[in-house]
Every structure is written in structure tokens, then in C-alpha cells.
Image (cartoon, helix red, strand yellow):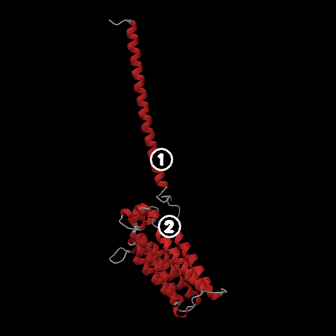
Amino acid sequence: MLTMSQSLQMRFVTVLDSTHEDRSTWKRFGESDNRNRGKKMLVRHNIKNTSAGISHEPSAPALVRFSRPHTVFGTMVSVASVSLMAVSAPNVIFFDMFGKAVCSALCMNIAIVGLNQVYDRKIDMVNKPYLPLASGEFNASTALFIIAFSVLISMLLGVYSDSTPLICTLVSSLAFGVMYSVDIRMLRWKENPFLATSCILIVRALIVQIGFYCHALGSGFLGIELRRNLIFSIFFMCIYSIVIALFKDIPDIMGDAQEGIQTLSVQFGV
């Protein structure tokens, strides 16, 4: 038989064991709760941020995001600056020509960046999931309709302007956009660093500068006078285009690597 002291001692040990089990249970419950809370915070963080630090949640209408606003702004500034270099005193005729140039250029810009999104959909699902095609807000048919409509409006404006330099600028820009993005044999120049750089340099530094300059002058390519401001602009845009080609793919390295796009950023692991 157990003495009273031994009985009390056993009860005390039992209470301690029970308390320890309860504490362990609450500890495991707390750890599990913290893990779940951390997962929820991580999910919320991933929803709010992309690899480039931009929200996945639509912050602008789908069509606006599809047009890539920063390229629209760049096109407007480029066309305006080149056109103003061609004249000393803008007049009514100049503003009429400038209006046709900038509207047609913006439409063609939307078509070119849209075409790139069609063929970069898988890459954009990793790098830019907020874009309409990557997020599923647009399907391929919708995107192609917008691209075709933009090209049509751009070319109609070019023809209506009766300006050979403007028409040539629009057509050649579209041609290089196709060569850069479309994934068929002998094209998809973006997969080759040298060809990608050449494409960007030719369009930004030569076609845009000379084409819109001649359009603003109201003359053909044969009557062009290479003024110092135009020469400086071409030289500056050559350097700028090379810098763009070298650095534009750094934020997209993850998606490019997954799809086998050997940009300089992927090759050098920047």
C-alpha cells in the first residue's frame, strides 16, 4: 500500500505531466497558427507584388496596360522632339502634320507592343503577370483584333497625310517589330542579343529620327539636309538604344531563362 506522501507525490507528477502536455499542445498550436499566418501574409505579398515590384492587381484598365503607357509616352516625346528640330517657327501646317504623325505613331506603337505580348505570353506570366494577356483578361483573339485595328488606323493616317517619309517610317517600324517578336523561322530576333540590339538601334536611332524629321520638313528622303541637331540626335539615340538593349532585360531574367531566351542578362547572370 502507498503511503499518503507517496500518493500525493504521484498526483503531483501526474499534474506536472498533464501541464507539460498542455503546454506542448498550445506551443504546437501556436507554431501552426504562426505558420498559417505567415503563409497568408506571403500569399498577400505575392498578390500585391511582382518580380519587378508592381502590383498584380489591375491598377489601370486592361487596354491601357496592353498599350504599355511608358512606350506611349516615349513615342510622343520622340516624335515631338524630332519634329520640332525640323522647323524654326511652327505654324498651322506644321501642327497638322505633327498631329497626323503622332497619332499614327501611337497606333503603330500599340500594335508593336501588343504583338510582342502575344508571343511573350508565357514569359510575361512570370515577368509581367499584370499584363492583360498574361493575366487572362484578354485572349489571343482580342489582342490580335486590337493589333490589326491599330495597324489599320495607323496606315490610314499615313496614307491620308500623303507623306512618303511617314508611310515608310510606319511600315519599316512594323516590319522590325514583327522580326523582333514573331516566333517563326528566321525571325524572333529578341532571342539573339546582337540582332535584338540591332533592331532597337535601327528603329529608335535611324528610322524614327530620319523618318519623322523628313515628314516634318514636308520633303522626301532625297531632299534631306543633315543638320547638326539631327546628327547629334542620331548619335545620342545610338548610344541610348544600346543602353536600352543591354539593360531592358535585367528585370525579366527569370521568365527569359525559363523559356530559353538567351539575352545578355541570362547569359551573364545579371
Q: Residue at x 38, y 9 (%)?
A: 6
Give the SS element for disc 2.
helix
Residue 136 appears anywhere in the view: no
- Residue under pointer 1: 41
Q: Quadrant of residue 1?
A: top left
The quarter in which the C terminus is drawn is bottom left
How far from the left and from the top, in percent, is residue 27? Answer: 43, 32
Please give left or right for residue 240 compared with residue 265 in the image.
right
Q: Is residue 21 above or below residue 256?
A: above
Q: Residue at x 50, y 90 (%)?
A: 164
Q: Are marks 2 and 1 in contact (CB under 8 Å)?
A: no
Q: Amino acid at mark 1?
A: Met
Residue 143 vs residue 6, the one in the foreground: 6
Give the SS element for disc 1.
helix
Q: Residue furthest bottom?
A: 223
Residue 134 vs residue 178, the one in the foreground: 178
- Residue under pointer 2: 65
Question: Which mark is in front, 2 or 1?
Answer: 1
Q: Earlier in the sequence, mark 2 or mark 1?
A: 1
